[in-house]
Image (cartoon, rainbow, N blue to C red):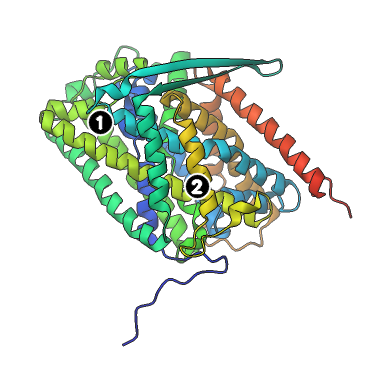
Amino acid sequence: MGSPTKPEPNSHGLIRGMGLGTATALNMIDMIGVGPFITMPLVVAAMGGPQALLGWIVGALLAFCDGLVTAELAAALPGSGGTYRFLSEIYGPKKWGRLFSFLFIWQLSFSAPLSIASGCIGLAGYAAYYWPSLDMVYMTKTAALHIPWAGPLQVSWIVTRGTGVAIVICFFTVLLLYRRITVIGRLSKILWLGVMATIGWIVVAGLTHFDSALAFDFPPGAFTLSRSFFTGLGGALLVATYDYWGYYNVAYLGDEIKDPQRNIPRALLLSILLVACLYLLMNLCVLAVVPWREMLQAGQNNSGLYVFSLFMQRVYGDWAARLVTALVIVTAFASVFSLTLGYSRVPYAAALDGNYFRAFARVHPVYRFPHISLLSLGVVAAAFCFLHLQDAIAALVVIRLILQFLVQAVGVIVFRVRRPDVPRPFRMWLYPLPALLAIAGFLFILFNRQNWQKEFRYAIVILVAGIVIYMIRAWRTHEWPFATA
């Protein structure tokens, strides 16, 4: 009898060691991080009552529409890099595609560490249920810079004991990921089991103690289609979008997934459907036990957001609250783990293309993974742990909507028109309706919120700075648009 087949390195030296199960598990633990556990009061505060469930439902539909966009592109263009690779091929790797893909990497230098840092900050926030002293503030400061054409740019940071915990989590994650991808695949399945056990317990506890009078205690005018209703829906969708994100993570790992043309779309769409069902059940169960007015107060004060600990305390007592807090912390760490793994492969793919610093193309000589990219990502994420959680989430979502998701949703239509010859193992259902709905949803989030101008200014400044840096590099290296014949 022959020996079992071992994963072999592909042409880039990476190992195709992940099948459909591992890819789906990674996506799910990426999506189900600390977000839904700590942001529920923020969604309730935005909508002003249990009608906040509408935010989760619309957010799921938006995630599925954009998931179909990513699934088609990932099946047609499998490989490490995800959106970076898509934008380069859609708009032309020698012209506009080179600029757009560079801008994607440029914004990722901000949004990827923000995403990881938000998970670490949220984890530390839940740990404050055990140790309230973690919320002790040592210093907080706000700096403002007035730019004539952009308006005031404000940045606030805070130093607490929890900040130190968040930074430690960043570096511990990097340490765990500093190893071979096949080992990481096994570890991701273990983390996935922990995530599912946590959510399962919450759902069972909620269904067995369900109080419909609390769950559907809508305030007067809850569904009146007024300006305040749509403004609240925009704020709720921003947070829900953040909580659903992660479904695209598998597209960053195309060179390390078996049969990527089939497994990437399946893992992506399957994870969205499963997570959407779990989120709706979780939120409905909590609303049926914890009065929404208590969550409203927590959301408005941006403190005491560990609502699931309070939920278990009311159902079973202190022991259950402490146990579920530990499980949520493990869940949050699993998400940080998966995010860091996926994002570390994107600068690597850009560096192989010559569109980023060469050092990021280096692969570890023994473990065969892009170690320089991983280390730099961890350091920047640790620096962003000094931000407020709500500010980190808002900045992250707006930056990525403008500089990634909108460009990609438009791009899938452009790619069909410009390159009809490319094989498409997976085609978007009801094309082009999902792409158009995704574009409309993203624009709604950008402009239908309170104080939407604040994060919008950040994104525009980052965009302009990225274009300037690209032009300087292109001029020095004689690349497009300064290339000579």
Displayed quadrant of residue 57:
top left
Write the residue at 47% across / 18% down.
231
| Amino acid type at image mark 1 | Leu
Q: Tell me if label 2 and label 1 are in contact, CB under 8 Å.
A: no
Above or below 91: residue 152 = above
Residue 226 in view of the camera: no
User: x%, y% of residue 193?
Assistant: 25, 51
Task: Tell me: 282 left or right of 245.
Answer: left
User: x%, y% of residue 275?
Assistant: 34, 43
Quarter containing the C terminus:
bottom right
Residue labelled with disc 2: 375
SS at mark 2? helix
| Amino acid type at image mark 2 | Leu
Displayed quadrant of residue 165:
top left
Residue labelled with disc 1: 284
Above or below 209: residue 472 = below
Write the residue at 39% across / 28% down.
163
Residue 23 in view of the camera: yes
